[in-house]
Image (spheres, rainbow, N blue to C red):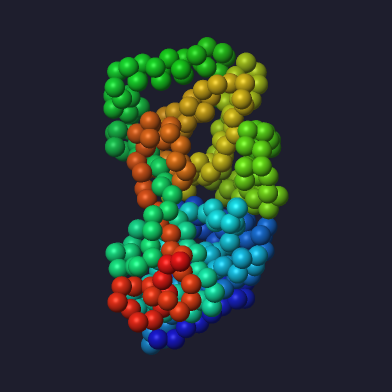
Amino acid sequence: MKTIIITDPERCRQAWEKYWPVQDIFDLWAVRQCFNTAFKRPLSFHLIEDKGRVVGFLPLSIVEETGEYVFFPGETWRGKTWLEQNRIIAQSPEVFNALCDSVPGPLNLRYLRRHPFMDGLTQARPDETGYLFYPRIYDFSMDNFWLTFPGKTRKKLKADVKKIEARQLTWRYNHLPDLSEMFRLNMAAFTSDSYFSDARFYRSFERFAAYLKDMGMLRVTTAIVEGKIAAVDMGAVFNNTYTVVAGGTHSEFAGIAKVINLHHLEWACHNRMEAVDFLCGSFNWKERFRLSPRPSYEIHTQPDTEVFHGSHYGRKAV
């Protein structure tokens, strides 16, 4: 087997578009490039060839402040990457070993999808859990969704929604100036804990929104209560999946987050979406709304240590 390492941005793009499967919004090179443009991490794309055919691919960026190699584009927040739906792309455990062994520094792969190889990995461990809503489970009917709740819970949730609706609730869609309000509300609520307090993330999301708009995939949902913006969510529609990527709510309107999230579910049922992806993050409302959990995994290694059980070369967990 032959190892190839690519650092030229254009050749990296060509390799990504050839070898990285495109299923979700974060699989698109242009989406990742929105973040890469802001963070400007050095690229290090690793390929394994066997008899002239590529059998393994590991697209990495170097986090210069720590020396770690992480999934491209290396958009870190407090030392952790943010983009999800990452994958192991290797024909066999031996190929994955070779990919890992070709990385000269610490390797930290987050938000990995489940892969059969993980059963043999010494260092794969649970990462955050993603949460999705699958309208097909309920035959694309919110009435069927409501029937999954106990009577008292259903009654209370609907009563909470009616309280907001009674305050002259209206909806506005795809009004681009509302994104500035979303950023402001998010930072007002989370202050230094907001992703958008990092100017690089802020610029990344501005580019992300512009790209989605140009491609006809952007969905901005704004809840207006008593004439004021109460909540704004930014979402992406791709491959019949609606991914809610960011949001902000006004503290003056208690319960508005619940209302806008239910609105997303209703819209997805009406438009017969295959899924609504609310991404990772353990928030109680996701369990209360019967969203389906999807685990992700992390691999954190150092050079010259074991990757797979019984392997005499490679890496292992730290």
Q: Residue at x 51, y 22 (%)?
A: 255
Horizontal side, residue 193 vs residue 288: left or right: right
**Residue 270 appears anywhere in the view:** no
The residue lying furthest to the top in this view is: 166
Q: Residue at x 47, y 31 (%)?
A: 261
Q: Nearer the viewer, residue 127 or 215?
A: 127
Count of labels in the image:
0
Rendered view: 260 above or below 159? below
Where is residue 32 drawn, in percent x and y?
57, 58
Q: Residue at x 36, y 44 (%)?
A: 293
Rendered view: 316 above or below 275? below
Horizontal side, residue 25 vs residue 213: left or right: left
The residue lying furthest to the right in this view is: 199
Q: Nearer the viewer, residue 168 or 192?
A: 192
**Residue 192 appears anywhere in the view:** yes
The quadrant in which residue 297 appears is bottom left
Q: Quadrant of the N terminus?
A: bottom left
The residue lying furthest to the front in this view is: 318
Where is residue 231 drawn, in percent x and y?
59, 29
Where is residue 15 drawn, in percent x and y?
51, 72
Rendered view: 201 above or below 66? above
Q: Residue at x 39, y 17 (%)?
A: 156
Rendered view: 157 above or below 54? above
Q: Nearer the viewer, residue 203 or 68?
A: 68
